[in-house]
Amino acid sequence: MTTPSVAVIDYGMGNLHSVASALAKVGGDLDIRVTDDRAQIISADRIIFPGVGAIRDCMGEIRRLKLDDVVSHCIAAGKPVLAVCVGMQALMSHSEENGGVDCIDSIAGNVCFFGENHKDADGNKLKVPHMGWNNVFQKKAHPLWKGIADGSRFYFVHSYFVQAEDQSLVTGVSDYGREFHSVLSRDNVFAAQFHPEKSGEAGLQLLQNFLGWDGSP
């Protein structure tokens, strides 16, 4: 029997060691490939598309390594894909960050700045980046929510937030002075703004669900 495999796409942006460690914790006998090699990624059973940092640098490396084509190929092939943080943002059409950057455009929508003078509903100034634990409210059913209570808290680090054009893709929302789309899903893609690998039991449960997911919505 072949050992199940998951490729963690490595373009030099993100704490890949913590992602791999979390996968190893929940995955049992699992072939974990932290790689930028096209063949290794395409032949894997599942794909994780992580990311941390400025979108211009991330998209620059993604395009230099031709990983935008690899990600698009894996999505089209129906492989389960989990995009995390900047990986989620990179799937969108465009980001306001760094003066405006075109992204992979797999999901129609934009990545917007919270703002320098971001405030809550009572007028209290909120720190940007949004950093720390926040609730995620489930907007539609999904296999990756199995065993995770609605409103569970996950760990975020971001100054920019995603707004998808197609509201039917919105799978989870969070609030930080305004509501934003913290989870999107479409077919075999599940994209989360939070970091599952840093989100305690709920994050580990989500990763475990991903490893058992066949890509069906």
Image (tube, helix red, strand yellow):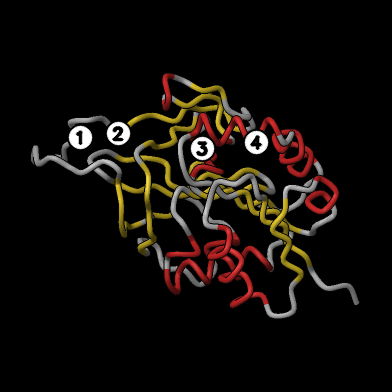
Tell me the residue that label 2 is attached to: 114
Query: Residue placed farthest to the bottom in the image?
Result: 28
Residue 211 in picture, x, y percent from top left: 67, 66
Question: Please, what is the three-letter code of the amino acid marked with disc 2?
Answer: Phe
Question: Please, what is the three-letter code of the amino acid marked with disc 4?
Answer: Ile
Mark 1 and mark 3: Cα distance apart in space: 20 Å
Tell me the residue that label 3 is attached to: 89
Question: Please, what is the three-letter code of the amino acid marked with disc 1?
Answer: His
Question: In the rendered view, does 173 fall on the left or right side of 25?
Answer: left
Whether label 4 touches label 3, CB < 8 Å? no
**Identity of the residue drawn at 31% across and 40% down:** 179
Q: Secondary structure at mark 3?
A: helix
Question: In the rendered view, does 149 fall on the left or right side of 142?
Answer: left
Query: Residue placed farthest to the right in the image?
Result: 1
Whether label 1 touches label 4, CB < 8 Å? no
Q: Secondary structure at mark 1?
A: loop
Tell me the residue that label 1 is attached to: 118
